[in-house]
Every structure is written in structure tokens, then in C-alpha cells.
Amino acid sequence: MSTGSVSSAHPVALILVAGYAGSGKSEAGKLLSQATGWALLDKDTLTRPLTESLLIGLGGDPDDRHTDLYAERVRPLEYDCLMKACWENLECGVPVVAVAPFIQEVVDAQWSARTRRRCARLGAGVEVLWVDSDAPSMRERLTSRNASRDTWKLANWRRYISSIVIDRRPAGEFHLIDNRVTATRPLAEQVESVALALSARYDGSRV
């Protein structure tokens, strides 16, 4: 884990804002984008309409985010779209704040290494911001946002929680945001601290 402000040889960054559903990733990503002026790419915003249409076309439920159909036929395409948009921005010298669960990706040391190598070829660095939460906090947020894609999780809460690893953390260094309801520091304050650290590390920040 790291929140330092050491200098970087890279002028731009790819920031991966990751965490479980209901952790507060989207809000954290927006706050970070506002603080830095960097491009915000949220997987749901970029892909949700296509995801829902594809699931219907495959004979599935448009709100499915838990079956093998989604995991094997749809999820890889969502991430492919998101990452291609990230690469294009970085090729243009534009720093990117990418928001998605990245649950499988950030714990995979090989995936992280490949991503860092590709970013290095583009003259970019990589930072991971993990938005941490607990089961009661996530359930409260999912209930409050009342999104149809969360219906299965809320209706099968014990089954869902037992299927995830709450204390999972990314491989390698990362910035930790404590977004539990009981957190001692507000989300905005924590994100601002990360934004200040990143502004010292990369050129082009507007912080």
C-alpha cells in the first residue's frame, strides 16, 4: 500500500479505481477526476446499454451480473471496451481515471504486470485505488441506489456475500480508501489526499 508523493518518470497515469459493488467506486472516481481534471471512464457508463442488449440477445436477463453467461460471454467484452478507451486516451497523453470492479484483475499479478508494461510503452504509470467497505455499508448503498442490476444481490444477500472475499486487496502497491459507513475520514477528504499525492507524482495535474 502506498500514498506517497515520490516523483515519477511518467508524465501521465492510468488510475484504476476498484472495489466491490456498493463500495463507492463511482463516487470516488468522480471525486478524483474532479480533483485532478483527468478523464473519467466508468465501465458501467461506457458499456451498460450494450451489456443489457447483449444479455437479452443471448437469452439472458439484462440485469444479470452473477451467472456464467455474464462472466464468460459478456464481462470480458465490457473490460475490453473499457481498456481500449483507456489506451486511446493514454496514447494521446491524457491521464485516465478508470472505474470498474477490477476484482479479478487487480489481484492478478500477471495482469498487473502486463498492464504496467503496456502503460510504460505509452509513457504512462499505473496506480490502483482500492475502495474498501464492509458488508453492511455495501448493502446500505446498494439498497439506496435502487438499481435493477443489484436486485439479485440484495435478494440473495447471504449467498452473494459468501461468494466474495471482503478483505481482498490488490497485488502490489495501491492506495486504500476506507469507505465504510463507520470510516473516521470522509470519502472526499481521503480522495483529496490521494489526488494531492498523484499530482506530485505526475505532470499535467490540475490539483
Image (cartoon, grey):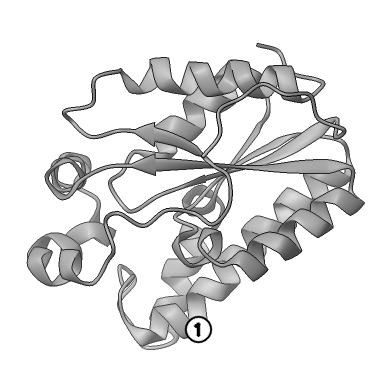
Q: Is residue 37 in sight in this rendering? A: no
The quadrant in which the C terminus is found is top right
How far from the left and from the top, in percent, is residue 186? 31, 18
Q: Is residue 9 in sight in this rendering? A: yes
Residue positioned 54% across, 23% down in the render: 194
How far from the left and from the top, in percent, is residue 4? 61, 25
Position of 90 compared to 98: left or right?
right
How far from the left and from the top, in percent, is residue 6? 72, 24
User: How many numbered marks have been drawn onto this rendered protein structure?
Assistant: 1
Badge 1 element = helix
Q: Examine the rendered structure and indicate whether residue 192 appears above or below residue 91.
A: above
Position of 10 compared to 54: left or right?
right
Q: Examine the rendered structure and indicate whether residue 68 appears above or below residue 147.
A: below
Q: Examine the rendered structure and indicate whether residue 2 appears above or below residue 197.
A: below
Position of 57 compared to 137: left or right?
right
Residue positioned 44% across, 55% down in the render: 101
Disc 1: which residue: 73
Position of 161 compared to 15: left or right?
left
Asked where in the image residue 153 lies, by quadrant, the reply is: bottom left
Asked where in the image residue 84 lies, by quadrant, the reply is: bottom right
Residue positioned 59% across, 72% down in the render: 77
Residue type beneath disc 1: Arg
How far from the left and from the top, in percent, is residue 104? 48, 67
Q: Residues within 10 Å of mark 1 (few under 14, many from 20)?
A: few
Residue positioned 74% across, 37% down in the render: 13
